[in-house]
Amino acid sequence: MNGRTRIKFCGITRAQDAACAVALGVDALGFVFTRRSRRFVEPAAAAAIRATLPPFVCAVALFMDDEPAWIAAVLDAFGADLIQFHGSEPAAFCDGFARPYLKAVAMASVADVPAHLDAYPRASGFVLDAHAAGEAGGTGQRFDWARARGLSRPVVLAGGLTAGTVGEAIARTRPYAVDVSSGIETAPGLKDDAKMRAFAAAVRAADCG
């Protein structure tokens, strides 16, 4: 039994969405700094939102195969409590920014998940997402949740999660955390208050189940 499942809302672009997430007790907010993403947010705008966050809400900076100079510039402007590397970055690259990080696992391409996790010994945890290597997350697709069971490292379950599916996902895998983006949106980067509330409530219900 995992106890309380942590919640991350990713793709935050608006202060009002961050405020709603905070009011719901969400543990982490993800800000996407990869320019090709539909959920890209300028570092200055993200920093302004981050300045409104109360203590103990984690601000996550997401990158996907970005240049080191860009990552360094974003971290200088935004700060970030945690980095999420969502591309094909090797461990040596991820380790080079002197911050704790999550590594995304492209479940459509990775056959041996335990071996893949072992390749990143310094990662704080792993985001298991449904996309293939080279593709962005936030597609609303899901993978076979059975592949997330029994892993020895902290797992953040992502991919195709909504208020209607997250309860089953938690019951089947008992992840450390769940990560949602498209499942709480009306459009990429624009969150929906009712969907956010329903998702958070479904996670809490699953934890009590």
Image (cartoon, helix red, strand yellow):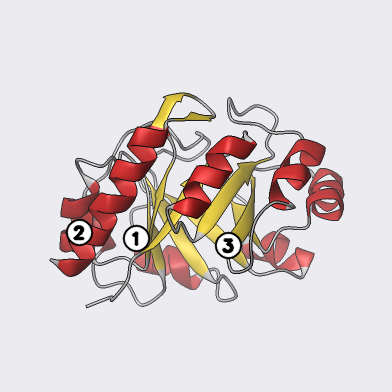
Residue at 42 percent of width and 38 percent of height: 132
Tell which tag, 1 or 3, sits nearer the viewer.
Answer: 3
The three-letter amino acid code for the residue at tag 1 is: Asp
Q: Secondary structure at mark 2?
A: helix
- Residue at image mark 2: 205
- Label 3 environment density (alpha carbons within 10 Å; few <14, some 14–19, many ≥20): some
Q: Residue lying furthest front in this view?
A: 23
**Horizontal and vertical percent position of residue 115:** 41, 68
Tell which tag, 1 or 2, sits nearer the viewer.
Answer: 2
- Label 1 environment density (alpha carbons within 10 Å; few <14, some 14–19, many ≥20): few
In the image, residue 105 sits, relative to residue 20, either above or below, namely below
In the image, residue 170 sits, relative to residue 190, either above or below, namely below
The three-letter amino acid code for the residue at tag 2 is: Ala
Q: Secondary structure at mark 1?
A: loop
Left or right of 11 on screen, residue 94: right
Left or right of 90 on screen, residue 103: left
Left or right of 17 on screen, residue 128: left
**Horizontal and vertical percent position of residue 92:** 70, 65
- Residue at image mark 3: 57
Instruction: Locate the C terminus by quadrant.
Output: bottom left
Left or right of 150 on screen, residue 156: right
Q: CA distance from mark 1 to mark 3?
A: 33 Å
Residue at 38 percent of width and 41 percent of height: 196
Disc with the residue nearer the chain's start (1 vs 2): 1
The three-letter amino acid code for the residue at tag 3 is: Val
Question: Residue 112 — which label?
Answer: 1
Instruction: Locate the N terminus by quadrant.
Output: bottom left
